[in-house]
Amino acid sequence: MKDYKVYLLDFDGTLFDTYYSLTFIYRYAFAKIGYNCTPEQTAEFMHMSVMETCDRLGILDPVKRQIVHDAIGESLDFPENLARIKPYDDVAETLKELHARGKICAVVSGNTEKHIALALKATNLTSSFAFVVGYSPLRKPKPSGDPIFEAMKHLPGVASSEMVYVGDSLQDPETAHNGGIDGILLERKGEYPTYPGEKITTLKALYLSR
């Protein structure tokens, strides 16, 4: 595996196990418009933007779409939902090892910066990341390269060839490609057996292969 200077890491499903929390969040948000979101749907929707999710469900009414968007943003930071998310077991050690090797780590996610900041603070991981790029209505969401381009603004003088984006869904390496950098798929449970690109089953692989 190539050695990089900068490791951009996805949040949901990569750094933090947020699925359990999101089942409550999506149920709460879609109930606002009379729709029952199942846990199975949550597993799919958590890798999409809210607008993509509404498109998938055929929710085209702009008022209903906004209600869902606002309800998700509101309930993300409910104390009970924040308490439901935890970093994966390989996160702390991986960050420690990458920092020991002089690497820069940052979060690039479709989640909100406020929510990510609260989660990092609650788990004492804030100082592990140089910066966070989260959702913005002013940027195109993943798989657009816009989140990567935003991250690059924090990294003056660092060549794109020295950066990699690591995430747990197929849209993450696509986002990396669209942003002009390398991408690595994190496949914790063998979800993508036919994926032809570079993939790992644990974040520890980012340093154990050195």
Image: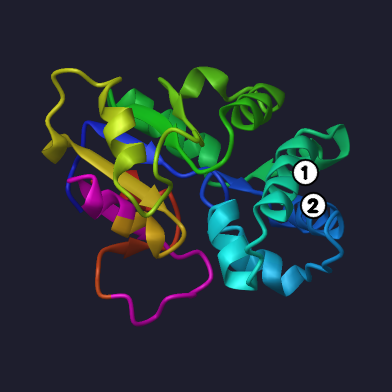
Q: Residue 119 occupies which quadrant of the picture?
A: top right
Q: Residue at x 37, y 55 (%)?
A: 143
From the viewer's perspective, tell me whether residue 204 is left or right of residue 150: right
The residue wearing badge 2 is 29
**Secondary element at image label 2:** helix
Span highlighted in magenta in the image: 175-195
Question: Residue 192, how many percent across, how many down?
Answer: 42, 76
Q: Which mark is residue 120?
A: none
* Disc on res. 71: 1
Placement of the C terminus among the 4 image quadrants: top left
Whichever of callouts 1 and 2 sits on the residue coming sooner in the sequence is: 2
Q: Does any portion of residue 88 appear in the rendered image?
A: no
**Camera-side residue of 108 and 137:** 137
Which amino acid is tagged 2?
Ala
Query: Does 74 appear above or below 65?
Result: above
Q: Quadrant of residue 159?
A: top left
The relative height of residue 112 versus residue 141 in the rendered view (above or below) is: above
Q: Position of residue 26 (x, y in %)?
A: 76, 56
Residue 177 among those drawn in magenta: yes
Residue 182 percent coordinates (x, y):
21, 50
- Tell me if 208 is positioned left or right of 52 in this view: left
Q: Is residue 77 magenta?
A: no
Q: Residue, x 53% and y 46% (percent of image)?
A: 90
Find residue 169 and report its horizontal and vertical position in percent.
45, 62
Separation (CA) of disc 1 from disc 2: 5 Å
- Are discs 1 and 2 less than 8 Å apart at CB? yes
Tag 1: amino acid: Ala
Per the image, label 1 sits on a secondary structure element best described as helix
Q: Nearer the viewer, residue 140 or 63?
A: 63
Side (left or right) of 56 relative to 166: right
Q: Residue at x 66, y 65 (%)?
A: 59
Q: Can residue 147 be seen from the camera position used here?
A: yes
